[in-house]
């Protein structure tokens, strides 16, 4: 590989594995397509070609290039193919699992799934698995890391959860949660219809 | 030995003591006083039974005890028809409280049955592993997020961020407490010393004049010069200081005095 191209891949790799916060404080992962086009002075087809080359380079490392849309913009980022240590601790993973299970239950009824933190409290706090303070702290951290978005009492998926857990995995987690929470019906979400 | 005491009696005493103002006996007394009628034995019995059962379950939940299904069922049947005899809001709330504790006991029993001998921590770790092994984490090489806004140095007049412009008082406070960070290169020090001595030797100045004419670093330098005897000085009175025309220190100069001068002159030395 030419030296120049290797340099370019290095910079591209750094851009794809970056993250920053937008004006609303939400975590933005990777880099937008427009930013890449502007930075590389290339056409969309040239960019696609370059990204294909990069994909070939990173796949042997156990990484894959992901393209996702957020709002009107297309983003690119890098994801591992295998389970590797991540930023979350065990209780945070457990809470995320419960959130995913509740969300999947909500998704069966509503187009835009959302749950309330009191639904989580019923499963985790009332059963003595976590204290109310611990749950609140974990939710705060999950929101901070871009896994969930909290607006008032409502919780929705952040982009990161959908990127790290595809639909199949989310369903599998919901099924696992059903076994682990046997006897605890996840309360059906009240999506504000009664208001 | 305190360990020999039966734990049950201790529990009962503690619960009764904490709820002394809210017992069924007090309630029945109040009811009697208000209505003038003595509650029937049946009502009394129902209320007291409800109370005892509620307390039994509340204490068990607190102590993380689990009763068998059969026992809970017997308790439930015992007060199943109690609502016929409940009259006041207090009694109905007590009824609700009993059913709530009964439901919570059922929850607890389910949790224990499904995962026997599993502490909440173990449960969390087990379930976390289920989630974790299905994750495909995103990769971030740059661990530092750009969450800190770019630092902008405040303007000269507004060292504090404020939506309103600073008032005259603010400006005075800023001027008073502002510390001027000046840098004087070491190579220039001798030159500055000589110039300072030339400026002050043989003069008699009040402290106010002195502080108005000197900058921070000049005052520092002046202290050193006086201390080292390079520029002998004496206090003429409490507010006036006289610098000797010659370097030779006379006997009367060895009377030490200190004056803290506040710098008024804010001339800054150019960085080199």
Image (spheres, rainbow, N blue to C red):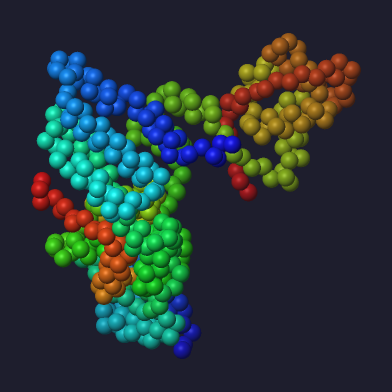
Residue at the spot 19% in from the left edge and 27% down from the top edge = B41
Q: Determine the image quadrant of residue B166.
A: top left
Instruction: Indicate the quadrant containing the N terminus of chain B: top left, top right, bottom left or bottom right.
Output: top right
Q: Is residue B125 left or right of residue B50?
A: right
Q: Is residue A170 left or right of residue B141?
A: left
Number of numbered callouts drawn: 0
Where is residue B64 shown, x and y percent of the image? 39, 48
Does residue B237 appear in this view?
yes
Q: Is residue A193 left or right of residue B31?
A: left
**Looking at the image, residue B167 lies above or below residue A20:** above
**Looking at the image, residue A93 lies above or below residue A191:** below
Q: Is residue B80 left or right of residue A141?
A: left
The front one of B240 and A87 is: A87
Where is residue B106 shown, x and y percent of the image? 28, 52
Does residue A28 appear in this view?
no
Residue at the spot 33% in from the left edge and 40% down from the top edge = B56
Where is residue A87 shown, x and y percent of the image? 44, 63
**Looking at the image, residue A68 lies above or below residue A88:** below
The front one of A47 and B256 is: A47
Residue at the spot 41% in from the left edge and 31% down from the top edge = B13
The front one of A161 and A192 is: A192
Which residue is situated farthest in the front direction here?
B41
Q: Determine the image quadrant of residue A45.
A: bottom left
Residue at the spot 66% in from the left edge and 34% down from the top edge = B217
Which residue is situated farthest in the bottom direction here?
A1
Where is residue A58 shown, x and y percent of the image? 41, 82
């Amino acid at each position: 590989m030419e030296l120049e191209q290797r340099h370019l891949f290095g910079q591209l790799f750094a851009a794809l594995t970056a993250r920053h916060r937008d004006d609303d404080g939400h975590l933005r992962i990777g880099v937008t397509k427009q930013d890449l086009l502007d930075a590389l002075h290339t056409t969309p087809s040239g960019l696609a070609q370059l990204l294909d080359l990069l994909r070939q380079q990173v796949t042997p490392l156990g990484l894959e290039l992901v393209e996702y849309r957020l709002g009107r913009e297309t983003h690119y980022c890098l994801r591992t193919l295998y389970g590797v240590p991540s930023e979350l601790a065990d209780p945070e993973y457990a809470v995320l699992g419960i959130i995913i299970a509740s969300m999947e239950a909500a998704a069966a009824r509503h187009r835009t799934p959302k749950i309330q933190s009191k639904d989580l409290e019923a499963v985790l706090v009332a059963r003595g698995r976590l204290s109310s303070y611990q749950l609140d702290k974990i939710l705060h951290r999950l929101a901070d890391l871009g896994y969930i978005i909290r607006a008032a009492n409502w919780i929705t998926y952040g982009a990161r959860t959908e990127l790290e857990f595809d639909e199949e995995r989310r369903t599998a987690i919901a099924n696992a949660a059903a076994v682990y929470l046997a006897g605890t019906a996840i309360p059906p979400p009240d999506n504000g219809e009664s208001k | 030995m305190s360990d020999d005491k039966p734990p049950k009696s201790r529990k009962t005493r503690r619960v009764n003591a904490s709820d002394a103002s809210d017992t069924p006996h007090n309630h029945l007394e109040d009811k009697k006083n208000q209505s003038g009628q003595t509650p029937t034995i049946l009502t009394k019995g129902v209320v007291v039974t409800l109370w005892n059962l509620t307390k039994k379950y509340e204490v068990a939940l607190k102590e993380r005890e689990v009763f068998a299904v059969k026992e809970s069922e017997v308790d439930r049947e015992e007060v199943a028809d109690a609502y016929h005899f409940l009259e006041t809001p207090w009694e109905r709330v007590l009824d609700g409280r009993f059913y709530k504790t009964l439901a919570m006991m059922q929850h607890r029993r389910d949790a224990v049955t499904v995962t026997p001998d599993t502490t909440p921590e173990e449960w969390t770790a087990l379930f976390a592993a289920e989630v974790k092994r299905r994750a495909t984490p995103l990769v971030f090489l740059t661990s530092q997020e750009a969450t800190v806004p770019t630092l902008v140095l405040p303007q000269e007049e507004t060292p504090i961020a404020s939506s309103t412009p600073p008032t005259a008082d603010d400006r005075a406070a800023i001027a008073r407490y502002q510390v001027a960070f000046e840098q004087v290169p070491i190579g220039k020090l001798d030159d500055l010393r000589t110039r300072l001595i030339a400026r002050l030797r043989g003069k008699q100045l009040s402290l106010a004049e002195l502080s108005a004419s000197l900058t921070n670093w000049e005052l520092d330098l002046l202290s050193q010069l006086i201390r080292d005897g390079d520029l002998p000085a004496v206090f003429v009175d409490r507010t006036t200081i006289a610098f000797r025309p010659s370097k030779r220190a006379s006997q009367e100069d060895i009377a030490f005095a200190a004056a803290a001068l506040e710098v008024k002159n804010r001339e800054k030395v150019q960085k080199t």
